[in-house]
Amino acid sequence: MTATATPLLELRGLRKEFPGRPPSVAVDGVDLTVHEGETLALVGESGCGKTTLTRLLLRLTEPTAGTVHFDGTDLHGLDHAALRRFRRQLQVVLQDPYSSMNPRLRVADIVAEPLVTHDPDYRGRGGRARRRARVAELLDAVGLDPTVLDRYPHEFSGGQRQRVSIARALALEPRLVVLDEPTSALDVSVQARVLDLLAELQQRLGLTYLFVSHNLAVVRQISDRVAVMRAGRIVETGTAADVFAHPAHEYTRALLDAVPVPDPRRRRRRAA
């Protein structure tokens, strides 16, 4: 997971207000850059604006002010047709894999949804064999046996469902994947396996990740750089090593101090 110096995603002066008296400011003048090939972790407590920020960069919500550039293209200047083409390059894995899937669809259809939506070669009866072959390839890539093609979401464990979500996100060979709390609904052992899978896929496919989380232990394991968000603003950015070893902002220090420490002696030393 070595970051390059090439900017892939650039947010400048991004602001989002929601109506009210006074208006509620969810994102307040955010400047942020994600470099190609890196994992940038966006961390902060619940309600700090992380989800709104990701919706803005995915163009699921329109900003009040500011710009989002992807590989030099202003996303908020794209018309519907151009935006549809762009979505092939930027995909998302959501927090709860079960709620992000249609329970009435089989895994073959769930993973194939992006293919059918964006590529006419995969549509209809003529594309059925091509769809199943591509879905089987994607499931194999995320460590699932392709024989599960015809199962439904409820027949999988939480970790397996998240692997299905990752397979769906990779279907269109995106350049950037937004991972919105992708391990928070999983137990610790399953979390570790999913994180290992993400790291392996990144290295093999050359992916760039924006990893959104409040779990600093997970962030430390997977990220190259960290951006700390508080009350809609980015208060600190830096390499993961620097932010964890030498946090510059008091809010970052408070977040690190709140991380549970299993060793009682370390807890006492930290309290002192």
Image (cartoon, grey):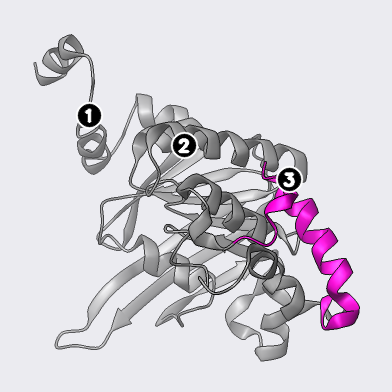
Q: Is residue 214 left or right of residue 171?
A: left
Q: Amino acid at mark 3?
A: Ala
- Is 230 situated above or below 242? below
Q: In the rendered image, which residue does mark 3 sit on?
A: 141
Figure quadrant of the C terminus: top left
Q: Is residue 130 magenta-colored?
A: yes
Q: Amino acid at mark 2?
A: Val
Q: Is residue 215 magenta-colored?
A: no
Question: Which numbered disc covers residue 165?
Answer: none
Q: Is residue 72 left or right of residue 224?
A: right
In which quarter of the view is residue 71 placed? bottom right
Q: Nearer the viewer, residue 33 or 217?
A: 217
Figure quadrant of the N terminus: top right
Crowd around label 1: few <14 · some 14–19 · many ≥20 (10 Å): few
Q: Residue at x 66, y 90 (%)?
A: 80
Badge 1 element: loop
Q: Is residue 269 visible?
A: yes
From which residue to which does the magenta span run? 122-151
Mark 2 vs mark 3, CA separation in Å: 17 Å
Q: Is residue 4 visible?
A: no
Give the main secondary structure, helix, strand or loop, of the magenta stretch: helix
- Is 221 situated above or below 93? above
Q: Nearer the viewer, residue 206 or 232?
A: 206
Q: Position of residue 87 (x, y in %)?
A: 67, 73
Q: In the rendered image, which residue does mark 2 sit on?
A: 190
**Residue placed farthest to the top in the image?**
265
In which quarter of the view is residue 233 placed? bottom left
